[in-house]
Amino acid sequence: MIRRLGALGLAIAVLTVVVVVSIAVGSVTVPFAQVLEALGGARTSEAHFIVSGMRVPRTVSGLVAGSCLGVAGVLLQGATRNPIASPALLGITAGGGFAVVVGVAFLGLPAGAAVWVAFVGGAAAAALALGLASTGREGLSPVRLVLSGAIVSSLLGAWTAGLLAIDQRTADDVRHWLAGSLAGRDVAAVGPLLPVVVAGLLGAWLLAGQLDALALGDETAVGLGQHPARTRLVAAGIAVLLSAVAVALAGPIAFVGLAVPHLARALVGAAHRPVLLLSMLLGPAMLLGADVVGRVVARPSEVQAGVLTALLGAPLLVRLAVRVKSPA
């Protein structure tokens, strides 16, 4: 218990520091006194436009998207008993990206509609992957889910690349978003998605006990009165909702949903409730941290957060891939 409380306190402290830095630091230098004035309501200065109009919205978006990615990663890894499972497993990020490209290229949708287009595209891709994995007499299994997700992601990724190759205007419009970025986000887009986020986080919390039983093996879980197939479907469904929100708010951010659950388990053990709680804090800390580094590492330009999380997460993926065993 002391270990878990200590880890929780550390995660809260780290997230608090990252949020403060995210609001105070950027590609344009703003004195901290002016940052405080802007947050206090001074609306006539350039600092107000930078802090309240740009940094606060991207910080809020990063908080929500990071929490969603962290919790979704825990659910997917717990449901599949696969340590390399992540929101990208179900093709959610690829589906969101493809939907945005189609909306911009062929439907002429305004930029403000990209949030909902990405949400629908990510959810549809995940549903397709789940449907493919559930066909056949064997039904849904971890291996089939991994293969189906890889197929859907590869297919949608190829279609996206093809569309961008034949439409240079669209490529210029969406390239920044497809790299995964919090820049230019509108805090107004977060509000309508909050009910989905709250429902998803609450569902994940209620599902934690069933995931603990599932970790012991299907036979043991059945002996404890659980229904493994139903638990996997519900967990995957909640992960779809949370991941689609993250894609809608921040674009296809890689490796946050993969790395954060492993870090949380290293700090508090394997029980899903403390892992979920810690991942909900560490996810936004990682995403916002990458966003802050991206703002200052190449001033006055910016490096997208998705690029930096990929650079950080790729070595972890390689390490996990060489150690992972086939799911039972």
Image: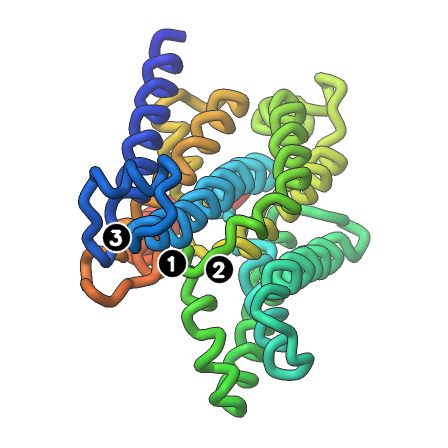
Q: Quadrant of residue 269?
A: top left
Q: Contact, CB < 8 Å: mark 1 with mark 2?
A: yes
Viewer-closest of 257 and 199: 199
- In the rendered image, which residue does mark 1 sit on? 306
- The answer to whether 123 is drawn above or below residue 277 in the figure is below
- In the rendered image, which residue does mark 3 sit on? 26
Report the quarter where the C terminus lies.
top right
- The answer to whether 316 is drawn above or below residue 218 in the figure is below
Q: CA distance from mark 1 to mark 2?
A: 7 Å
Query: Helix, strand or loop at disc 1?
Result: helix
- In the rendered image, which residue does mark 2 sit on? 252
Q: CA distance from mark 3 to mark 2?
A: 22 Å
Q: Quadrant of residue 2?
A: top left
- Residue 289: x and y, percent? 30, 44
Disc on the earlier residue, 3 or 2: 3
Q: CA distance from mark 3 to mark 1?
A: 17 Å
The mark total stands at 3
Name the amino acid, label 3.
Gly
Q: Residue at x 23, y 58 (%)?
A: 27
Q: Is residue 72 left or right of residue 207?
A: left
Viewer-closest of 288 and 126: 288
